[in-house]
Image (cartoon, grey):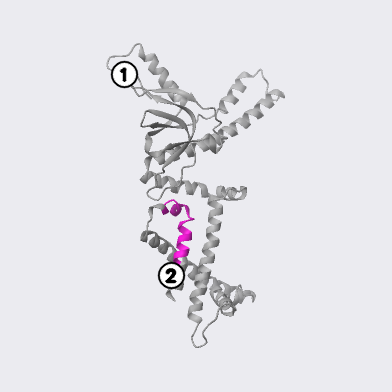
Amino acid sequence: MIGLLLFPILICGYLMITSWPSERIRISLYHGWSLYIRAAAHGTLIVTVIFVTFGSILPAVGLYIGELTGWRVLPDTNIFTWVSRLIENTPVLRLDADKNPYPALDIASISITAIFITWVATKLINFVFYGNTKLSKAISRSVGAKRYADNCIENLYTTKSPIEHQLFLIMRQGAVDILYNDYIAEERREVYNAIVEGEIPRKNKDEMKEIFEALRYRELNYALVTLENGKFYIGLPTVLPDPDEESVTSSSIRLIPVMSGYRNEKQILVFTTEYDFDVGATQAHDCISIPRDKILTVSGFRFGTHDRIKLRSESHGGRQCKGKKPLKT
């Protein structure tokens, strides 16, 4: 009889830790008995909440509504009693007439109800947090589900893997900047059409300059990934792989490259290859995969900042002050 309650506790706990973002990204850290204990802890809480809610709170509310309106929400205002009667009346189940089946039926009804409610809840969680439909994305934005899931991943990477954390921050900011630039591009098209149609006078150059100054594109912050052999790649990280069974670090990272090259003996960046990709509309085959154990450093990189530093270094190269060295990136 205890197994009838222990089994659903483990099932409910496992369903939840494989669906809820803060637990889903940590499940690779649990092994053997630690996974069972984690699932049992969450399952016990879930079954307790369901039992109290559907066994005490809702029946009390149902009786109160029944007294006011004369209509009962459920038979006997208790879903567990209702499920027990369904089990008792099913022709599949054969009960021993000499034994009292009701304790077993009550536990079975609690187990079935808890598993069903948890399964429905996890389906809703997956739909909101990980769905790809327009409706799921709209609901996710309205309730802040995507931001919560990102914060869970960021907190894990902060404590467990600095490189993945850096790549995650660049990836998230890159997505925001690309959306912003798409918005700016649309606004610029509207301004251009207004100029063509004469709504904005071309002679008023100060006004046009002010408008386009306000509609400036954001400079993207890329990831500068330097490998052990001195080669480097500059690009935007894509979705990081799920943590493996040993740790939160991934076996490889995927990058949308825009530039690559190598570091010379002075560790200065030497560009050799430019990749002609639209970072806002890339496909899976446009990405490159870099082995995680070959990565030496990861940092943010902006071409505008690099060009300014390079120009300053070159301007100081012919007239360096004593004791000063050329700037490096």
Residue located farthest toward the bottom when viewing the structure as drawn: 98
**Residue 178 sits in which quadrant?**
top right
What percent of the width, then of the height, locates residue 309? Answer: 41, 21
Q: Amino acid at mark 2?
A: Leu
Q: Is residue 28 positioned above or below 203 on the image?
A: below
Q: Is residue 12 magenta?
A: yes
Quarter occupied by residue 169: top left
Q: Earlier in the sequence, mark 2 or mark 1?
A: 2
Q: Which mark is residue 325?
A: 1
- Mark 1 burial class by Cα count in 10 Å: few <14, some 14-19, many 20+: few
Residue placed under numbered mark 2 in the picture? 6
Residue drawn at (65%, 27%) of the image = 191
Please say if 295 is above or below 123: above
Magenta-drawn stretch, dominant element (helix, strand or loop): helix
Q: Residues within 10 Å of mark 2 (few under 14, many from 20)?
A: some
Q: Amino acid at mark 1?
A: Lys
Q: Position of residue 310 (x, y in %)?
A: 41, 20
- Quadrant of the rendering where the N terminus is positioned: bottom left
Circle count: 2
What residue do we see at 28% from left, 14% from top? 322
Residue 264 point in image, percent of width and height: 36, 22
- Residue 36: name its quadrant: bottom left
Residue at x 46%, y 73% (from the top left corner): 4
Question: Which type of secondary structure does the marked residue at label 2 adopt?
Answer: helix
Of 59 and 36, the residue lying toward us? 36
